């Protein structure tokens, strides 16, 4: 079975971007410190555990997830022996 690489990359990007966004907002809503999420500022420029920082992290997550999905989908098709 051939994997549609573009669709998979978009799906991974949207999923990871929304995960970062909602995880940040969840921490803010319930007043947790978010020690694990605070470490994302080392990877995503402009990210912080704030409402705007959640949006910035979501956009970075969209890009990061899409690149990861693109690489994974390409490798899957390559190693599964599926013709291009």
Image (cartoon, rainbow, N blue to C red):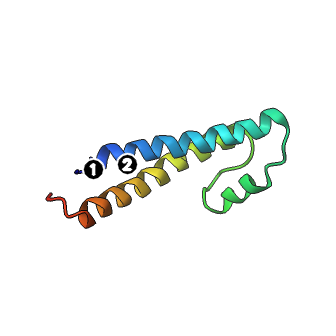
Residue at disc 1, secondary structure: loop
Res 9 label: 2
Q: How would you rate the neighbour count of disc 2 (Cα within 10 Å): few for under 14, some for 14-19, many for 20 or more?
A: many
Q: In the image shown, does 28 or 79 lie closer to the viewer? A: 79
Q: In the image shown, does 27 or 78 lie closer to the viewer? A: 78
Q: In the image shown, does 48 or 18 lie closer to the viewer? A: 18
Locate residue 48 relative to residue 16 in the image: left or right: right
Quadrant that contains the C terminus: bottom left
Res 31 label: none
The residue mark sitting in front, 2 or 1, is 1
Res 3 label: 1
Q: Is residue 18 above or below residue 84?
A: above
Residue at disc 2, secondary structure: helix
Q: From mark 2 to mark 1, how far is it between C-alphas?
A: 10 Å
The location of residue 58, given as percent across then percent down, is: 57, 43
The location of residue 26, given as percent across then percent down, is: 73, 36
Quadrant of residue 32 within the rendered picture = top right
The location of residue 39, given as percent across then percent down, is: 71, 59
Residue at x 72%, y 49% (from the top left corner): 48
Residue at x 25%, y 62% (from the top left corner): 80
Q: How would you rate the neighbour count of disc 1 (Cα within 10 Å): few for under 14, some for 14-19, many for 20 or more?
A: some
Quadrant of residue 36 within the rendered picture = bottom right
């Amino acid at each position: 079975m051939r994997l549609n690489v573009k669709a998979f990359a978009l799906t991974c990007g949207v999923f990871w971007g929304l995960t970062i966004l909602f995880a940040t907002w969840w921490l803010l809503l319930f007043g947790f410190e978010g020690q694990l999420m605070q470490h994302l500022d080392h990877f995503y420029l402009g990210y912080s555990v704030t409402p705007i920082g959640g949006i910035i992290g979501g956009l970075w997550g969209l890009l990061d997830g899409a690149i990861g999905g693109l690489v994974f989908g390409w490798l899957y098709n390559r190693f599964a022996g599926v013709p291009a």
